[in-house]
Image (cartoon, rainbow, N blue to C red):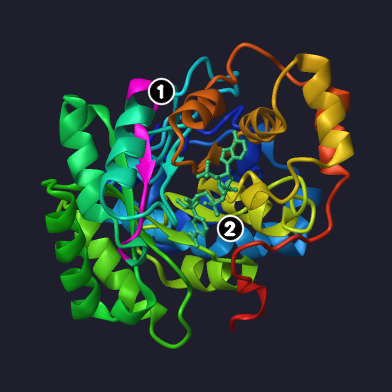
Amino acid sequence: MPTSDRPTVDVAYSGYRHTVGIAEAVVRGAADVGADVVSVPVDTVTEEQWAQPDAAGACIGTARNLGARAQKGHNAMSTTPEPHRAPTGPADTLPLRDAVRIPVLGLGVFRSPAGRATQQAVTAALDAGYRHIDTAAVYGNEVDVGQGLRDSGLDRDQVFVTTKLWNADHGYQSALDAFERSRRLLGVDHIDLYLVHWPVPGIRQETWRAMEHLLETGKARAIGVSNYMTHHLEELLGHAQHLPSVNQFELSPYNYRSRADVIDLSRKNGIQVEAYSPLTKGRKLDDPPLVRIADAHRRSTAQVLIRWALQHELVVLPKSTHADRIAGNADVFDFTLTDDEMETPDALDENLVTAWDPTTTP
Ligand SMILES: NC(=O)c1ccc[n+]([C@@H]2O[C@H](COP(=O)([O-])OP(=O)(O)OC[C@H]3O[C@@H](n4cnc5c(N)ncnc54)[C@H](OP(=O)(O)O)[C@@H]3O)[C@@H](O)[C@H]2O)c1
């Protein structure tokens, strides 16, 4: 219990296995800024783990920010920690910060042509049970995503909409203006998740202040980043007042191990990882190890890749403009990959990049 009327940091992460290190860090961060700690699951972190460079690096920025937020009267850890359980359908959700929840499966619309093709893909997805659409300003189809939402007849609050700030729009005022353009094109009063599309060097810190403003004013329910690798994320953790809720980057069995560091860093800081290009843009759908697993379950290799991502607790964003594939890609909640079947794809790593490669961006 708090020992005074100083601000408190409520840490309720016990049992949340990705946050090893945060509890200890919060104690230090809270002390730094004179906040009390209500409860800390000290059993989740050992001195040995804390001594690891990545644990310290991952947590120290977070700790200060959490403490500072507590001082301002915010609940430092407002995500709802919950033990992992297998999702039961496409509308099933995972917790983000600030009591926001995100559906585990989202329809991606990159290279989904503007006009009817995207509108129909969105309505097909919503008919098939998806409740999450992932677009971006640069995809040029936000207006069609918005039309698809309205055509579906679903209430606005039943669908989680993500869009992204394009590289040319970095900077404080430019980011606010870009957000407003996206919001209008989508025809919505708020955006559920607004992401920085790419860690543009030199200016991304200023951009993040605009993202925080959008969060604080309720225009975006959650904010996050995309294509942030370890060094980008460490920089952000060092200066953010509001940590990102999400980090979206390319993930499939073909690069999962190569990206273990950024997955760990994200999770240690309560940042949900989203997998884009989860189907490798179709390149690996005939890969024999995947075909063998798919045959064993009488499923497609696309379904195996999506199921693999879900079992890794990733939010997964397959793209298709074909209604049958869109429905099939969501039909992945009634089978389970065995430990062996999870490990086989994990061993396929070849550092595959089918989109763009952020690792060399300073
Ligand atoms: N933040 C970023 O920088 C970033 C970068 C890339 C992607 N993303 C997001 O992630 C989403 C997905 O990534 P992606 O579009 O690069 O690729 P993807 O989802 O890995 O693959 C899409 C490709 O697979 C095909 N496909 C889909 N379902 C299939 C199935 N069941 N059987 C066979 N082929 C199938 C699609 O063709 P059809 O459409 O013809 O069915 C398309 O050619 C994007 O749409 C976007 O929302 C974000």
**At x 76% / y 45%, what residue is drawn?**
253
From the viewer's perspective, tell me whether residue 268 is left or right of residue 3.
right
Mark 2 — residue?
59
Residue that extends furthest to the bottom in the rendered view of this protein: 202
**At x 40% / y 21%, what residue is drawn?**
128
Mark 1 — residue?
91
Q: Locate the N terminus by quadrant.
A: top left
Q: Whole-percent x and y of residue 164?
A: 35, 60
Asked if residue 62 lies in the magenta stretch, the reply is no
Q: Whole-percent x and y of residue 224?
A: 40, 56
Above or below, comparing residue 102 to residue 213 in the picture:
above
Give the amino acid at mark 1: Ala
From the viewer's perspective, tell me whether residue 91 is left or right of residue 345.
left
Q: Earlier in the sequence, mark 2 or mark 1?
A: 2
**At x 66% / y 47%, what residue is drawn?**
282
* Mark 1 surroundings within 10 Å by alpha-carbon count, few (fewer than 14), some (14 through 19), many (20 or more): many
- Helix, strand or loop at disc 2? helix
The CA distance from mark 2 to mark 1 is 31 Å
Q: 131 or 51, which is in the foreground? A: 131
Q: Are marks 2 and 1 in contact (CB under 8 Å)?
A: no
Q: 112 or 254, which is in the foreground? A: 112
Q: Which mark is residue 206?
A: none
Residue 3 lies in quadrant: top left
Q: Whole-percent x and y of residue 193?
A: 32, 49
**At x 81% / y 34%, what residue is drawn?**
290
Give the amino acid at mark 2: Cys
Residue 60 lies in quadrant: bottom right
Q: 199 or 167, which is in the foreground? A: 167
Q: Which residues are magenta?
A: 127-137
From the viewer's perspective, tell me whether residue 40 is left or right of residue 126.
right
